[in-house]
Amino acid sequence: MIRLSRNNLRIPKFQRPVFVVGAGMTDFRKRYPEKNTCQLCMEAIRMAVEENDLKVSPEEYRRSVNWCVYSQFADHFGDQLLAAAKVHDYLGFDPLGNIEVKTGGATGGSAVLAAAQAIASGYASCVPVVGWERMDEVSTKVGNSYIASAACKDFESELGWMYASYYALMAQRYQYENNVPRETLAKIACKNHEYARFSPYSQNPGHYTVEDILKNDIVSDPLSFLECCVMSVGAAVLLLADEETAYRLTDHPVQLTAICGGTHTLRTADRRHMPILLLPNETEETYADYFQGRRYEWPGFSSFLATRMAAYLAFNMAGIKDPVEDLDLLETHDAFTISDIQTYEDLGLRPYGRGREFIDSGDAYYEGRLPTNMSGGLIGTMHAVGATGIFQLGELFWQLNGWWDKFHADPARWARYGKQKPSDFRSLQVPGARRGCAVSHAGTGSHVTVAVMERT
């Protein structure tokens, strides 16, 4: 059994406030042969610097930077070691120092965490976080095997060298323990594909019914193709700064009030049980009857301790008492519909065993109490892995500033990517949004970051 001490559960504290001043991204595609990685990163950072109402010129911004953080999941895809060095040089930041972060699917969130730590400690005052993934230089089969290498090769690769197989087993176990119907999972896919229809950046938008999802071809039982994230090419950028620099650069900074990380063993079979780590909106009474059914231990095979740990730290750091009440927006790492519903519970949106209530109640929708994945998420819009956690926070930044329409509704922006704005387009700007949360997740829950952003 895992036993955590008070020091293990110490709530982090930034020594200086950390702010986001800009966000940018490319569109996301299955293949992007006309642009190389450096060009994609340049496109994303130009959007962040030139289209977010900064008060300084691009050259003045470049002269403000004193540290850089880069985010790429795997060198394998682009067959280029130290790819960050090429990007750093191409963006004109030599000879400034930089680091490249790799924590699987959570690489983007971890990169933002590293940048925030640099600013909060006083090491740096202005840090761009640049993430990308080049997944089109290998076949889908080979790409899946590369991604699956982020699980334990010694024990789990025989499940098929494909993450859908890992999560299919989780889905079967979760459904067994909690009596969750397939229709509930399908609703998540319908929602996220639908919201992706209103994003010019999205790779996999679509209007589907629950029946469409259930009749779709199966990747790994019970998950269908439309319930799985997409392999993508693209880049995303987030501009971080300390308070003084932030207000010199913009009149619209958004505070990164918390970003925290958690981990769990790479091999799922090594995961030991422990008492449920309670969030601020939970008590021991919440789970008084929890272990009387088919669930007899926690976190087991169907909960993510890493997410619960990161949420525990971030919510306490940001003063979140009840996530559904205190947050206005949420971006989850919906790599698969099953991981999404598991995450609802890990974040305390519903108690363990009752995650289905969050989607079934309507709370997760645009009109609901906590609109979730207005970006289209990984299922509908993208999973260019090194960019993903950055993309999520970029979408939150625009929402919190009331800029969602600016970056999604202009027909010229759709035309920029060779697309036509849908005739039935609808705005997904959440009125009066003040606080948002994003979850960046790796593997079968090996690394997770949870971030909270707040409009000041």
Image: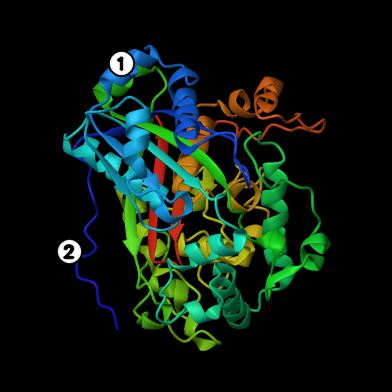
| Residue located at (48% from left, 63% from top) | 146
Element under label 2?
loop
**Classed neighbour count for the residue bearing mark 1: other residues with Cα under 10 Å, few (<14), some (14–19), many (≥20):** some
| Front tag of 1 and 2 | 1
Q: Which residue is drawn at 57% across and 57% down?
A: 334
Q: Which of 398 and 368 is in front in this view?
A: 398
Q: Position of residue 324 (x, y in %)?
A: 52, 51
The amino acid type, in three-letter code, at marker 1 is Arg
Query: Mark 2 and mark 1 in contact (Cβ < 8 Å)?
Result: no
The residue wearing badge 2 is: 7
Residue 360: tell me if it is visible: no
Distance CA(mark 1)–CA(mark 2): 37 Å
Its colouring scheme is rainbow
Give how far across and how far down residue 71 sits, in percent: 38, 45
Quadrant in which the C terminus is drawn: top left
Say which amino acid is labelled 2.
Asn
Q: Is residue 50 above or below residue 124?
A: above
Relative to 296, residue 186 above or below? above
Q: SS for tag 1?
A: helix
Answer above or below: position of 239 versus 345.
above
**Which residue is more in the foreground, 418 or 304?**
418
Residue 205 visible within the image: yes
Give the residue at mark 1.
248
Report which quarter residue 424 is drawn in.
top right
Q: How many marks?
A: 2
